[in-house]
DNA sequence: GGAAAAATGTAATGTTATTACATATTGGCC
DNA sequence: GGCCAATATGTAATAACATTACATTTTTCC
């Protein structure tokens, strides 16, 4: 049975990188959260079993995981979320709920290419990744209605 | 001759609000900047003529101006930018250059409604405002090429 | 086993933002 | 004008988010 951590490990191995114990712990916390976590929440969690953990511990590890595509940073929440589809090439379109702060990631939406072209018509070249769309998730619409 | 500040004043008057001296100063700095400014840059600027200015001074004023639609917050830059088209109803689509940190605001792009519908198909309701698209502005493409 | 590179530990500091409460200013009412 | 209530601003402290610089440990490779 391949767990998400196993997948991450082989994904990194393919790229000549290692899933060290520290990285495994951070990624594991993010996967367990099923949603975005703040850097200092992760720090607190790490400190349970690793007394010396400090801000650089967590930020360095997050930088690595983000760089490898295993984690995304959500600017509008100043938070980090495990990528559920890191193995597939994708665009990183994040639907960020303004009420519950949940994040849903869309794989490669068909409209993405159109959007890129429309924006390109203004002379601006979109980054491949990291489009955040704010709004209300389905659950929160019902709760609000 | 109606300056942008005059327009802002009457825009606020229409809504029963006032452009106080403090608000005028903050908005004026943002307009002069022709681009995003950090809260603490604004604070430093304010302190030139207002020795007691402190973080709440600037954050409160920014909250007000953002709430009135005269200023937008750019999450990805942790910065604030004067809205060049506040008088018109618009969608607040921001093209944020990752190299020079310039921001260009698109009025109401024709593709916005399509995007909203496509996203709605997933069950998510987009906010009317505040879509940030990261990439490279035209000038920076040429500089990079 | 020893040198170089990668990863982590540690201390200090920088940057962004909020809370809580005090004071001042404005506008309506008598 | 005098008073009250509401709005706006001042002030002090602190919280929350993130980076720099350097030391130490661990891994890799010869
Ligand atoms: Zn992803
Ligand atoms: Zn929600
Ligand atoms: Zn605008
Ligand atoms: Zn640029």
Image: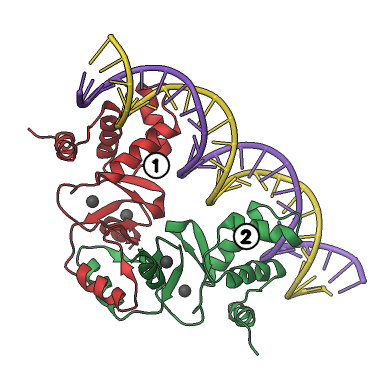
Chain colours: A red, B green, C yellow, D purple
Provide the secondary structure element on which disc 2 rests: helix
The Cα–Cα distance between marks 1 and 2, rounded to whole angstroms, is 27 Å
Q: Circle 2 is placed at which residue position?
A: B42
Give A139 or A101, whichever is nearer the viewer: A101
Residue under the image location 22 percent in, 63 percent down = B123
Percent coordinates x, y for residue A13 in the rendering? 16, 36
Question: Mark number for residue B28?
Answer: none
| A91 horizontally vs A44: left or right | left
Percent coordinates x, y for residue A135 in the rendering? 34, 62
Q: Circle 1 is placed at which residue position?
A: A38
Percent coordinates x, y for residue B109 in the rendering? 34, 79
Q: Quadrant of the C terminus of chain A?
A: bottom left
State which quadrant residue A53 falls in.
top left
Q: Is residue A81 above or below residue A126?
A: above
Q: Is residue A104 above or below residue B97?
A: above
Residue under the image location 30 percent in, 79 percent down = A121
Give A73 or B65, whichever is nearer the viewer: A73
């Amino acid at each position: 049975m391949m767990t998400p951590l196993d997948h991450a490990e082989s994904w990194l191995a393919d790229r000549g990188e290692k899933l060290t114990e520290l990285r495994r712990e951070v990624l594991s916390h993010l996967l367990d959260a099923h949603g975005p976590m703040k850097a200092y929440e992760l720090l607190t969690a790490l400190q349970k079993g690793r007394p010396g953990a400090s801000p650089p511990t967590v930020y360095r590890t997050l930088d690595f995981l983000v760089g490898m595509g295993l984690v995304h940073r959500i600017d509008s929440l100043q938070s980090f979320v495990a990528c559920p589809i890191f193995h597939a090439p994708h665009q990183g379109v994040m639907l960020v709920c303004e009420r519950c702060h949940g994040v849903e990631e869309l794989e490669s939406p068909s409209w993405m290419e159109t959007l890129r072209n429309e924006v390109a018509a203004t002379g601006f070249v979109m980054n491949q990744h990291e489009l955040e769309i704010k709004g209300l998730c389905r659950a929160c619409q019902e709760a609000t209605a």
